[in-house]
Image (spheres, coloured by chain):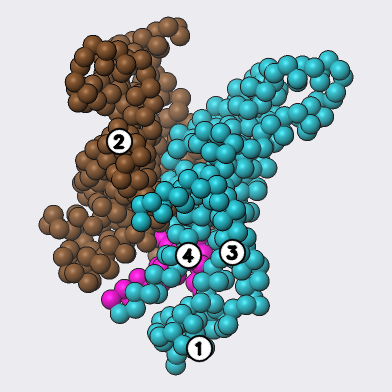
Chain colours: A brown, B cyan
Amino acid sequence: MGNYILKRIMSIIPVFLLAALLTTGMVHLSSVDPAEAYLTAAHIQPTDEILAQKRHEFGLDQPFFIQYANSIMKICQLDFGISYVSNMPVWDEVIYRIPATIQLAIASILIAVFVSVPLGFLAGVKKGSAIDHFSRLISFFGASIPTFWLGYILVFFFSVKLNLFPVEGIGTWQHLVLPSITLALPLIAMYTRLLRASVLENLQQPYVLFARTRGLKEKTIMTKHVLRIAISPMITGLGMNLGKLLTGTIIVESVFSWPGFGRYFIEAIFNRDIPVIQCYVLIAASLFILSNLIVDVVQMYIDPRISRKEGQHR
Amino acid sequence: MITSIRTIFKSQKVIPICSTILGILFIIAILAPWITPNDPIAVNLAYKLQPPSWDFPLGTDHLGRCNLSRILYGARISLGFAILIFISSLAIGLIIGTFSGYKGGWIDHILMRFCDGVMAFPSLILVLGLVGIFGPGLSQVILALMLVQWVYYARMFRGMVLSLKEQNFIFAAKISGSSQWKIIKNHIIPNVLPPLVVMGTLEMGWAIMDISAMSFLGLGVQSPTPEWGAMIHEGKSYIRTNPELMLYPGLSIMLVIVTFNLLGEALSERYGVKRRF
């Protein structure tokens, strides 16, 4: 078990190095000169002298792979450079905005889990019933509605027409309701679908037949046996979808003027604030990789057969 | 209502119905310049925010532009660029994936590690990162989407080639002296086609969603070009007085995506292809 986790952690390192290479290389390949972008963002008239000075300051006059090594060293110390726009360290700006995004993400994950676990489970157990068709409808439309449009539809009905929730901003719990529902719907669609398929698959397994022969109550079989194993792909889904959730926060934060990391990233794109862009992409990648790792470990606790399978392979 | 939904999902008519809807949309997209009642970018402040009339069947927006004309022209952008992204990323993926799987060895290893690296990023974040470096604009968005999407096709083709390579009819063809190109063309590509059609259909839906999301954020299509995502972006300021400004483009996006998704699902059921979630 410990060995497996250690191996997984080791496998992250090359992926992380590649991610850092991509973010450093991106700037190198593009036609953008960071020194010039900095001066434009800071409203300084670029002269050859200042440009050369800035290039030296950013280390742009060094060979590419030294720049790469330097950037990795800096990233390990959580130094993502200075924002061109605010002249503050990028990391400080990010730390200031991340809690709002995490709040939004956690709220929507909770909504998604609380809706999709019962829905997907019942849909699988009672296949062909009304609830099953309802779940199919939800998962179909949830996957087809553009998030940004859904946000405005909710705003129109619940804020403009019914005046129940604020249109935008952050503060009370009422502010959180519409953005987190908007963010949760695509997740609900996916998890409901995953869980339903997984329950259906598990019902065909011999262990269900065996439990029935043993005379266990149907309710016990379903909740203690089937649900416990069937939920495993959903947990993988949670980890795999963290990327989708992140892109979701970018859009939802723009729709609801939520002062989080995602909106900051979009502002940075408009301002060509390159250190912020690099920082976001790197953090997103790291988060994605880490969450996949955590998912694997959690899954092993839930379904120990996985680690045994892994053992057989080696 | 539930029974009618069930019949729609179950019936074998899904494929012809969806294909017809998409066919009509494509014809609209192609014929947009001839069938639109008004110029989609002609600003006329005297006619701003008009209700529907004979001249403007869906009313006008905040700059007095005809909503219907803009929606019809929007189909042109969404469908056109989705096809462009699909075909080009498919072509890149086909060449690299087939080559990689067929050759094997260290070339295969390097290419696939690169694909792993790209796939380690959530795709839209990589697109946003690329747009951030290259700067906002439609062509940058299209380029970024292509650069991200081909990896999935390459993976798919490689996997299929690997499983097909071991099959007996390939050996038979090899022994009977067919050239490598001929084996790929006559034996491998026909086997790869059904899953490709399914993936392509679903991919078109995603591409349209991504383009409109980027335009909505203001990073893709720039005004005054009519595009559905950008129209929602422009219409959002009028949500209290004229909600229809963002209702029409949103419904259009949904119609297209629902149709593509339904079609993709029906096709995958027919050909027994497993979907990528």
Q: What are the residue bounds of the magenta stretch?
A: B215-240
The circle on residue B25 is 3
The circle on residue B252 is 4
Q: Do the residues at pointers 4 and 3 share their chain?
A: yes
**Structural crowding at the residue carrying mark 3, measured as other residues with C-alpha within 10 Å and reported as few (<14), some (14–19) or many (≥20):** some
Q: Is residue A167 visible?
A: no
- Residue beneath label 1, please? B54
Whether tag 3 and tag 1 are in contact, CB under 8 A, the answer is no
**Gap in Å between the C-alphas at discs 4 and 1?**
21 Å
User: Looking at the image, is A219 positioned above or below residue B141?
Assistant: above
Q: Secondary structure at mark 1?
A: loop
- Identified by mark 2, the residue type is Lys
The circle on residue A292 is none
B33 with respect to A124 (left or right): right
**Gap in Å between the C-alphas at discs 2 and 3?**
38 Å
Q: Quadrant of residue B20?
A: bottom right
User: Looking at the image, is A220 positioned above or below residue B119?
Assistant: above
At a point 54% along the width and 77% down the height, the residue shown is B69
The circle on residue A126 is 2
At a point 48% along the width and 60% down the height, the residue shown is B255
